[in-house]
Image (tube, helix red, strand yellow):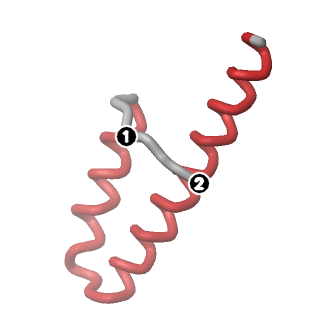
Amino acid sequence: MRFERRNCGTENEALFVGRKSRGMGDTGKLLVDQFLTLFSYVAEQERKKIGKRQA
């Protein structure tokens, strides 16, 4: 599965979460990785839905 980086309003939220987790060490990194993975999955599913509607 390929994910493309696109600018959107929630990208700022991802950066915020990343900055807040710096002080949490490895746990914070794990949480950020999980958040970004989930966010990428949701974005990919939305793009698929949009593609089906356009077709």
Using the image, determine if residue 37 lies above or below residue 34: above
Locate residue 31: give its quadrant. bottom left
- Tell me whether the residue at label 2 lies in contact with that at label 1, contact meaning CB atoms closer than 8 angstroms: no
Q: Is disc 1 placed on a helix, strand or loop?
A: loop
Q: Residue at x 77, y 12 (%)?
A: 55
Tell me the tag on residue 1: 2
Please name the amino acid that badge 2 sits on. Met
Q: Quadrant of the N terminus?
A: bottom right
* Picture layout, residue 25 above or below residue 38: below
Q: Name the disc covering residue 5, or none.
A: 1
Q: Which amino acid lies under the numbered mark 1 shown in the image of this protein?
A: Arg
| Corner quadrant of residue 43 | top right
Please state if 3 lies on the left or on the right of 14 as rendered. Answer: right
Circle 2 packing at 10 Å, graded few (<14), some (14-19), many (20+), is few
Q: Residue furthest bottom?
A: 26
Dot 1, how many residues are within 10 Å of its Cα: few (below 14), some (14-19), or many (20+)? few
- Residue 6, horizontal then vertical, whole percent: 38, 33
| Numbered disc total | 2
